[in-house]
Structure formats: structure tokens, C-alpha cells
Amino acid sequence: MSRATESLNTTAARPPTGLLGGLAVPDDERRGLARAWLGLGVFALIASGVFSVLLVLSRTPQVAKLMPLTDFFHVALVVHVDLSVLVWFLAFAGALWSLHGPPVLLRLGRAALALALAGTAIMVLAPFFGGGGPLMANYIPVLDEPMFLSGLAAFGLGIALLVLRTMATAVLTAGRGAAGFGLEAAVLATAIALAALVWSYVSLPRFITGKDYYELLFWGGGHALQFTYALLMLVAWLVLAQAIDAPLALPERVTKLLFVLGVGPVLLVPGVYILHDVRSGEFRGLMTWLMQFGGALPMAPFMLAAGWSCWRARRLGGRARPLHAALLASLALFSVGGVFGLLITESSTLIPAHYHGSIVGVTLALMGLAYYLLPRLGYAAPDSRAAAWQPLVYAAGQLLHIGGLAWAGGHGAQRKVADAVAGVASLEHQIAMGVMGLGGLIAIIGGLLFLIIVLRAVLAPKRCDVA
């Protein structure tokens, strides 16, 4: 039996007392809030999966005629993206922030959860009862109609209350470990992203409408929000590495300094707003530069340390294997996405290849963290064998998917169109899009497997086994 497996198995007989660096999992209402936020995130992934199926059906002859709206492909794509990225990531953040904070301002926490849940439900229902109007704006695409926008606003208000509660209680939890410090950096980035959104809303003249309006509205806050996602991933790497008994080879002070570097560029966002109009090219360029170069500052040490941890723990068995697989898969996808980002020279499918790689790297880290959290939140432990394969299947599919997108982008495929090969006769282009489609199918299977594993653990008899 490996050293990591022995370490994990020794905890099987007792309830969990905490996460990494003092991030406690208390047996009070905070635990219930964390469970509810995690449930919201899983619900968002389930609904996102349904819309991914509807995406395929909306492009199928005869079946497309049964769809409620004329352009249901883009309608479904908007909701799919918002659920699988915005809601999933921020709901998971809500679970972690609820665990990290002290047992105060719980009414504010419940109000935040209620608003976020109601907003998500409205966004899910909007395509069937609203008026459509899909606009593929960067970072947060929208349906430009009242029902969807009201749901998005309710979700945003819920997150704002969540951030307010977390920041108000941060002084009571500061200094309790590197992972906790990382969560506080993430909530600071989210607060600035929300402030940027409000600033853009107030600054934009009302004669700007349509996609241009939402592109400008979400440009500043959307860029800042990417720092939140990256910081959450780094926290997940810390927890997963320690959970497999191969902690990241970074001293705590160095780790905290890297988190400071990770959130530091976001602190410059207000300055960009002060110096430049949100409609200017300088504003757009500086926000992009902050994300591309500022966001990369802490990544290299973390990635090297995570890679070394994966190597040290390569012969794990039992319930440590899913955590190791998730850490390895997350590191691989995020790295490939970063490489694709360096290759971007024009608007093509290389851009979504970069974006999908980076975002899926975050998703895989949170999937592994979900496996770790389930028994500590009072649910059954996930099926070890299935959970060990799931991140690898999902990552393999996504690697094929983004590889096909990158290949097609090199042959002129345009982004944000339903049929990227239309009018293109290149055989290489056709093959690339076929690889992309195959990878997407495998990734869907991997995502479905994650949901099945989580739901089985949630619905199984509750126990305290955390091995």
C-alpha cells in the first residue's frame, strides 16, 4: 500500500475536521450552505448538459423544426455557456467561501443563495418562455430579452451578496493557511469584477445597443473574473496535492506571495477605468494585457510544483486516485490552453481552443475538489474506480476537441458560427472539425460520468467515511 493511500485510509474511522490550511468543514449551517452552493453548481452542469444535447438537436433536420425558437442553436449555446462557466464556477466558489467564513451573517448567506438559485432557474427556463435574442458577447453571452436578463441580474445580485458576506468576515479568518489566503484573493478579484460591471453600466451611453452594448458591458468585469477562476483552480491544486500526500513543494509564505501576484493585476482595473473610456481601444487593449501577462505571473511556479506532485504520487491506489487524476488532467488542459493562447494572431477557432483549454483546466480541478469534498460534507465517498477514470476521459475528449479547433483555426475556420466548415474545401480543415466533434462527444461522456458519480454519492446513505 502506498504512503498516500495509508494516510488517507487512516482517517476512515473519524469525521473530517478540516481542509487544507485551516479551511474547516464545520458541522453547522455553514456546512449546509456549502452543500447548497455545491448543489447549485451541479444543477447548473446538469442543465448545461441538457442544453448541449439541444445544441445538437437544433442542427438536426426535421428535429430543428420542433424547437421553440427560430435560432435555437445560439439560444441554447448562450445558456449552455453561462451555466457551465459562470454559474458552475461561482457556485463552487460559494461553497468554498461558505466553509471558509465564520458562522456570522448567515442570513445574508441564505439570501445570496436564494437569489442565485432563483436567477439560475429563470435563466434555464428563459429559452422556452422568453423571446430569444441570442447575443454572443465575450465572457457572458446573453439572451437580449427581459426574462433571461432578469435571471442573470438576480444571479449577479446573489453573488454580490455572497461576496459582501465573505469580505465582511474575512478579517476573522485571515492568516489561516495558504488555501484560505487564496480564497480571500479570489473573493477580492470577484468584488473588483462586480465593481467593474457596475462602472461599465454607468459609463455606457444608452444609444449603444445589441451585441456591442453587452460586449462593452462585460469586457472589464469579464476579464477580472478570469482571475477569480484561476485563483480557485490554484486553491484546488493545493488541496488536491495535499490530499494525495504530495503537497506542492512551495513554502506557505511563497504560496501566499504567489496568490498576491495572482490578484495583483486586478487591483489595477480601477486605474484602467479612470484613465480610459470603456469604449476606447486603449481600454480593451489594457484589460486584455492585464489578463494575458498579469495573470501568468503566479502560474509557472504553481504548474511546476503541481507537475512535481503528480510525479511523486504517480503510483496511488484507492480513493486517492481520482484526486490525482483530476490534478494531472487539470494541469494538462490548462497548460495546453496556455500554449494555444500564445499562438493566437487573428480571430479564428484558435481563440476558443485556448479558452476551452484554460476553462476546462479549472473545471477539472473543481471536479477533483468535488470528489474530495463530498464525504466531508456528509455524503458518501465517490466510486473510486469510476471517479479515477472520469477526469481522464473528460480531459482526453477536451484535448481532442481543442486540438481540432486549433487545427481548424490554422486553416481559416471562424469562431462563433454554427458551421465553421461552410464554404471551406480544405481536407485538413474537414478532418480537424471531425476531430473536434469526436472530442466533444467524448468530453460529453466524461461530463455525464462526473454527474452520475456525484449524484450517486449524494443519493447514497450518508456517512462519515473520508478515506
Image (cartoon, rainbow, N blue to C red):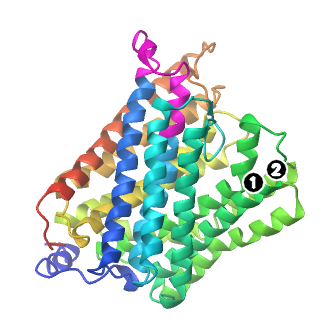
Looking at the rendered structure, the kind of residue marked 2 is: Leu
Which quadrant holds the C terminus?
Answer: bottom left
Q: Nearer the viewer, residue 42 or 8?
A: 42
Q: Residue at x 25, y 50 (%)?
A: 389
Give residue 386's position: percent from left, percent from top.
Answer: 20, 51
- Label 1, secondary structure: give it: helix
Q: Quadrant of residue 348?
A: top right
Q: Is residue 59 magenta?
A: yes
Q: Residue at x 31, y 74 (%)?
A: 31
The magenta segment is 57-80
Give residue 402's position: percent from left, percent from top.
Answer: 50, 39
Looking at the rendered structure, the kind of residue marked 1 is: Tyr
Query: Which residue, given by chain and number where applicable, does mark 2 sit on?
Result: 204
Give residue 69's position: percent from left, percent from top.
Answer: 51, 21
Q: Is residue 400 above or below residue 121?
A: above
Residue 293 seen: yes
Judge left or right: residue 350 versus residue 84: right
Q: Nearer the viewer, residue 256 or 121?
A: 121
Q: Is residue 462 magenta?
A: no
Query: Which residue, given by chain and number where applicable, does mark 1 sit on?
Result: 201
**Mark 2: few/some/many CA within 10 Å (<14, 14-19, 20+):** some
